[in-house]
Amino acid sequence: MTKRVLVIGAGFAGMWSALAAARAAHLANRSDELDVVVLAPEPRLGIRPRFYESDLSQVAPSLEELFEATGVKFVAGHVDDVDEARNMVTYRSADGEPASLRYDRLILATGSELARPNIPGLNEYSFNNDTLAEARRLQKHIDGLPQRPNTPARNTVVVAGGGFTGIETAAELTSRLRQIFDEDAQTQVVVVERADAIGPELGANPRPVIETALNELGVTLKLGVGVASISPNGAMLSDGSFIDSETVIWTAGLKASKLTGQIKAERDPQGRLHVTPELRVVGQTKIYAAGDTAYAATDDVGNHAMMSCQHAMNLGRSAGHNAAADLFGLECIPYDQVNYVTCLDLGKWGAVLTEGWDRQVKLTGLEAKKLKTQINTVWIYPPKADRDEAFSQAAPTRRLV
């Protein structure tokens, strides 16, 4: 009887999970015994690390030809329920009709979503670039600002959150605002961060570079203070001050997909499922997690995967291989990802590249920007729709860094 690996999600982890599972079956000459199925709203890979950019025309490449070339089946739908007892997933089809799919092994790769705390006006009046739809909404709003009256509120953008996404968003917007407004417009980008330092999770080593870049770009930092409420006219801060702004962008924090809550298992504070070295959910026999849904150790000294495409890609390769290998009694390959790098985009100023969990600075400025562009436009994109090339890149031992 044909067995099925069902992958929920078509993001970085989902795509690579499917390719790795198909690869494992192919190498074992068992392709005719395994159905690899991806269940997601549409067969596209959203290049989320680029959603802060002004040009969104090439950030959602199709996966249809790739899946066809590698024997991966795609089903369009939104998952409602995971039934562990029956090995069944229920979902709503593209037409909104209820449907279900059985599985022999399930890989949960539904990613993460923006954390939305209970801040008055957050849902009604803020923008974000968490999804492509939201990024396009923000883009449309910004493009329409020049048609509004020339006021400080129109010309000021507030970025709530001074982490990775907030820094990249702010750095990009400084030049973008200058491009769309007249020369006499006094534009301002303000980053509001609760911590006492910019990029708190990035650590001390790259901070001087980040501070220099943001200062030269003209970004204003408000540290040690948070956003208390948002209105159509701006943001009230926790210290009682108010920033006039018609554009408040929320970037503060991520949490794992809500579907992780349906799995009987331990989760970390962000909702990620604890997994074994093979990426099987702890306490489960047939369910794996990859990408932002997995709380996975990257090494044996206490480091864990970040919510990033860098880790999601390799988590997917490992989960897909191990799920298929488990079905056929083949060797599983424990996940590890000892090397860790970050490359933070700093707009027109350039970028900063760090290596290691202590983030030692290795490249800065335009040299780092060249590498960041290569990462964002080549390295993280899907492979060509060629089975041999795709399977080569889907090997669970493959590492980009």
Image: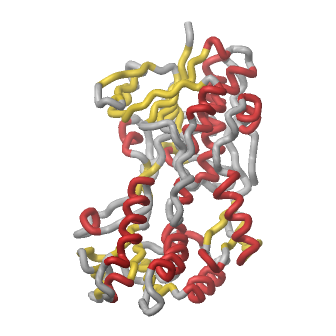
Drawn side of residue 121 relative to residue 211, left or right: left
The answer to which quarter of the image holds residue 168 is: bottom right
Tell me residue 194's x, y (percent): 41, 78
* Quadrant location, the C terminus: bottom right
* Quadrant location, the N terminus: top right
Q: Residue at point 44% right, 49% down?
A: 256
Q: Is residue 16 above or below residue 307?
A: above
The answer to which quarter of the image holds residue 398 is: top right
Of residue 270 and residue 309, the one placed in the foreground of this image is 309
Drawn side of residue 65 relative to residue 388, left or right: left
Of residue 271 and residue 54, the one placed in the foreground of this image is 54
In the displayed image of the protein, which residue is found farthest to the top?
1
Q: Is residue 267 above or below residue 234?
A: above
Q: Is residue 78 visible?
A: yes
Q: Residue at point 51% right, 58% down?
A: 56
Q: Is residue 258 above or below residue 373?
A: above
Q: Residue at point 50% right, 85% down?
A: 219
